[in-house]
Image (cartoon, helix red, strand yellow):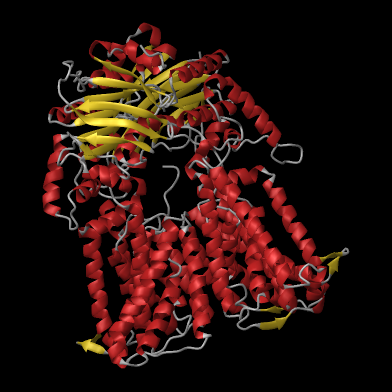
Amino acid sequence: MTGLRKFGGRTWIVTAAALIVLLVVNTVLQKNFLEPSVVQSNLTTFLPLVLVAIGQTYVILGGDIDLSVGAIVALVNVVTVSVIAALGGDGTAVALGLLVGMAVGAGCGLLNGLIIAGLRFQPIVTTFATSIVFSGLALWVLPQAGMSVPEPYWRTYAGDILGLPTVYAIYVVAFLIAAFLAARPFMTRLKAAGGLRTAAYQTGLRLGALRVSAFVLSGLFAAFASLCLTGETASGDPLMGQSLAMTAISAVVLGGTALSGGVGGTLGSVLGAWVVGMIGSVIFFAGLPFEYQTLVQGLIILAALAGGVLVTRR
Amino acid sequence: MQPVLRATDISKSFGAVRALEKARLTVQRGEIHALLGANGCGKSTLCKIIAGTVGCDAGEVLIDGAPAALGSPRLAEEQGVALFYQELSLVPQLSVGDNVFLGREPRNALGFTDRAAIFRETEALIARVATVAGAGLTPDALVADLSPDQRQLTEILKVLARKPKIIIFDEATATLDRRQVEVFFDILRELRAGGVSSIFISHRMDEVFAIADRITVMRNGQTVAEFSAAETDRYAVVYAMVGETGAIAASVRDHAPLKGDARLVVEGVKAARLGPVSFTAQRGEILGLGGLQGQGQKALLSGLFGAEPFAAGRVTLDGVDVTARRPAEAIAHRIAYVSGDRGRDSALPGRSIFENTAIASLVRERRHVIPGALFRTRFAEVLSGLNTRYAGLDAPIGSLSGGNQQKVFISRWLSPSPGLLLLDDPTKGIDLGAKGDFYLLARKLADEGATVIIYSSEDSELLSLCDRVLVLNGGTVTADLTGERLTPFELTRASYGDAA
Amino acid sequence: MNRFVEIAKNPLVISGAAILALLIIGELVSPGFARGDQVVRLLTVSAILGIAAAGQNLVILGGREGIDLSIGAVISLGAVIAGNVMSGSDAAIPLAFAAACCAGFLIGVVNGLGVTYLRIPPLVMTLGMMGVIQGGLVVLSRGVPSGNAAPALMAFVNRSAFLGIPGILFVWAALVVLMALMLKRTRFGWSIYAVGSNENAAVLTGLPARRIRVLLYGLAGLCGGFTGVCVIGYTGNSFISVGDQYVLPSIIAVVIGGTSLAGGSGSYTGTALGAIALVLLQSVLTTLNLEFWGRQVIFGVTLLLLMLLYGRQARLRV
C-alpha cells in the first residue's frame, strides 16, 4: 500500500509525457498539425471519447465499472434522431430531442446504478447485461442506420456558439462540470466508497446514492458523447459507439485512475482519452496502412500501462 | 440521574450462532465505562448495534431516555453516537484530513469543500497527539502510507472530530505503545470533563483500572456483572469474565535455564527498518521478542520466514544455511510461521476447514495428488488434539471463532512438527481459553525439540511463556533478558531503549 | 425449509433447472426442439462455448479480479492458424491443434506476466491484448479469410462418432471430469482456490502464487486456441473476428455456473451447465421467432434475473 500517492501521481505524469511525445511526433509527421483548423478537427474527433471517459471515471472511482456506455451512446442517438424527426425537425424539435436524449442517457445510468447499488449485483456482468438490453432497444427504435438529423443541428455542431467553436464550448462545459464536482464533497465521498466500501459505510456515507449518482453521471456523459457523435455523423445509427466502452476504460486507466477504485480523477482521464486519440492520428500520418491501426494502438496502450507501472515501482 | 445510554434485552444471531442474548448496558453522562469479556462474548457486536452498523433482532436502545433509531451508522451519528472501529474505518486511498472529515466536510458559501478548513482543523486535532504521533502524520498524508499506530491515532481523531456525546472505543489502544496510550487517556479524561461518555473496550486490564469509572462484564452474549472500578479488583473482574467453567492457563514457563548448543544462528540480518540483528537460540527454547510496537519484531519474523527477505545477513539452523528468499524455501527447512493477522495472512475465506488445514502439507510433502482419507484422519486428530471445536472438516473456515481458526492455522504446521516455529502476535484477538491452549502447545512443541520464536504485543504473555526475551528498539536488540532478569520492570525499561 | 433453500440456491441445481425449463419451453413452442439430434446439436454448440469457458473459469477462480477478455481474439487466432496449417488436409489436424494451442498458451502467458509481474489489472491487460491480437490478425490476413478446415475435423465436431454423438462431446465430457478431478484432488487445483481466496495466505503456506497465476492465464489461452480449432471445425472456414462472440458468453457461463467473480470458489461442472443453459436460452429465443432486438432484450433481462438468484454481493449491514 505504501507509495499509493506516488502511483496515482506518477501514472498521470507518464500519460502527460506520452501525450507530449505524441504531439511532437505528430507535428513532425503532419506539417499543418498546429494550425487552428487542424487542432479543432482533432479535438472534435476526440470529444466523444473524452466525454465518455469523464463519465466512466466517476463509476470507476466509486469502485464499479460501466460496460454499457457504448450501448447508451447508440440508444441516445437513435432516440434523439427519432424524436427530432417525429416532431418535424424544427428548432423546438431539436431542443426537445437533445433533452430527451440526455434524459435517456441519465435514465440508463440510473437503471444501472439502481440495479447494481440497490440489488447488489456485480457491476461487470450487470452493465454487460444492460448493454445488451440497451442495444436491443436501439435496434427496436431504429432497425437500420439512416434517418438524418436536420441541418441546423450538425451545422451548429460544426459552427460557433457566441464566437466560440461549439466543440470548444462543449469542452469548456464538460470541464466546468468536472471541476464543479471535483470541488464538492461528492468527489471525496465517491473515492471513499470505491476505496474501502466498509469504511465508507461505517463512516455514515450514503453509499447507494453515491454509486447511483456515479452511474447517472456516466449515462449522462455518454448521452453528451452521443449527441456530439450525432452532430458529426448527422444521422441515426443503432450500432454507434460499440467500441467506446472499452476504449474509454483504457483512457481512464491510462489517466491514472485505479480500476480498483478510490484513486484518480477526471483530468487524467481527459489526458488518457487524448493519448488514445493521438495514437490513431500518429499512426495515420506515419503512413502505416490502415490495418496496422488496431495493432499499434493496442501495443502502445499496453506499453504505456506497463511503462506506468514500471516507473511506479522504483 | 438519567443515563445517556441504556440498552436493554439486546439479542442478535448470525445464522445459527447466537451472538447476544438479552445483553444490557447502561452508561451515565460523562463517565468512562469499560466493557469487558473474553473474545466472542458479544461486546463488539453490542457496540456495533449501538453504532448502527449491525441490526439487532430484539431489544431497545434509549439515548437520553428516548428510544433511538439506529438503522444505519449515519442515523446513529445523528444521535450523537460514534464508534472507534477495532478494524478501523479509514479509507487508505484518502488523506488523513479527508478521512477525519469524511461525510461531514466543512464547506464554503458555494457548497464546495473547504480544503483549507479541513487542513487547519485536522492539524489542530493532530496537535493533540503531536508528542506521540511520530513522523509523517500530517493532514495531507495518505492513510495508506501511515504506520499501524498512526492509523489508529487517525481513527481516534476521526471519532473526536464528530463531537459525539457517546464514544465507543473498541480496542482503540491495540496497536498503541505506552506513551501513546497515556496521551489517549488524557484525551479521554478531557472528554469526561466535557460531559462526553466513553465506552472503553480493552484487552489490557491495567488500562481498564487506570481509566475506567465503571465496568460492565459480558460473557457468552449476556451481561453478567457491573462494577464500580474503585470498589472492585482484578480478581473479581476476571472471575466474572471467565465464569465458573473457564480457568486461566497456568504459567507454562520453564524457569530452568537451558543448557545446550545454539542451533539457530542469526548473523547480522538487515531489512528496511531492522538491524543489523544477531542472536542465537537453542533447541527447546521459547525465545520472546519484546519491546514497543513496530520496533522490528515483525520484520525479523517475516524475514526469517522469507516473506519479506532480509537485505543482508545469514541464518543457519542446525548448521544448514536457511536464509530464505521466499516462504517456500523456509518451509522446506521445516520453518513454520503463524501470524496474528488471520484475515490477511492465514485464512482462505470461503474454503473448508480441511483445505485451510491441509494446504501447507501439500507443499511440505511435495504431494501433487491429495491423499484425501489420509489427510482427513490426520488433521481430524491434530485438531481434536488442540481442543478445536468445529462442525466438520468440510464446514467453511468462517464458521469458526477466532481462537478456533487460529488453531486450524497452527495445525497446518504440526504434522510433521516444525524445527523452528515463528509466532507473530499469534494470540491477538482470541479468547482466554484458546490462549491457554496455545501456550501449552508452544511449550509442548519446544519440549519436543522445536525452537519457538514469539513476538507478542502483551508483555504478560512473553513473561509467562518465554525462556528468554530479546527486546528490540528501533530495529536493534537492546536487551537479552533471561532468568531473574526476565521481569516486567526490566522488560519495560529495555522497551524504552533504557538498556541495563 | 432452510435445507430446501440451500439446495435451491446451489448453482448446479439452478442451472440444471434452467436447462430443463428451457427444454420444456422450447418443446412447447416448437415441437421437436428437445429431440435427440437437436439436443446433440445444441450440446455441440455448448461444448465449443464450454471449452472456451474452461479457460475463463480458471482465471476467474484465480482471483485478483481475474478475467480474460482476450479469449475471443485468441479463438480467432486459433481458428486462423488452424485453417492455414490444415488447408483442408486431414494429416495436418494434430499439427493444427498443437500450433493453435501453443500460440494461445504463449499469449496467455504474456497476459499472466503482465497481470502478475507488471501488476496491470487483468481487465485492462487482456483488453489491450485483445486489441493487439485483433490488429495482428488484420495485418496478417489483410482482412481476407484464408485457410479452411480438414474434413476429419469437421466430422469430429459435426458428425456422429458413436451413438449419434460427435467426438467433440466426448472430449468435452472428458474435460469436465478432468477439471473436476484437478480442482478437487490435486495440489494445483487447491492452489488455484487458495490463491484466488487469499493470495497472501497462499504465499505464506509456500505456494508460488505468481507462477500459478501466470500458468492460469496460459491455460486460458490454451483453451482459447483449442476452441479456435473447434470453431473452424464447426464453421468450415475462419474469419478474423469469429471468436468475438465468445468473450462475454464465456464469462456469463462461468457466472451462471456459480463461480464467484471475486475468485476462490466455484466449479467447472457448474460452468459447463451454465454454458448449456446459455446456448439453450439463445436457441429458445431464436425458435420463438423474435426479431433480433427482442432476443437481445430478453437475453439481457434473463441474465439480470439469473444474477438476482445468486450473482449478488454481500450486504454491508448484517
Residue C79 shows in this picture? yes
Residue B348 shows in this picture? no
Q: Quadrant of residue B337?
A: top left
Above or below — where is B194 with respect to B75?
Answer: above
Residue B473 placed where, x, y %? Answer: 40, 22
Residue A311 placed where, x, y %? Answer: 54, 51
Q: Which residue is drawn at 42% across and 83% down?
A: C80
Residue B143 placed where, x, y %? Answer: 53, 36
Residue A32 placed where, x, y %? Answer: 78, 72
Q: Residue at x 33, y 83 (%)?
A: C96
Q: Residue at x 18, y 30 (%)?
A: B441
Above or below — where is B83 with respect to C11?
Answer: above
Q: Quadrant of residue B368?
A: bottom left
User: For the view shown, which residue lies furthest in the top direction?
Assistant: B231
User: For the view shown, which residue lies furthest in the right direction?
Assistant: A163
Q: Which of B54 and C102 is in front in this view?
A: C102
In the rendered image, which quarter contains the C terminus of chain C?
top left
Q: Quadrant of residue B399?
A: top left
The image shows a total of numbered marks equal to 0
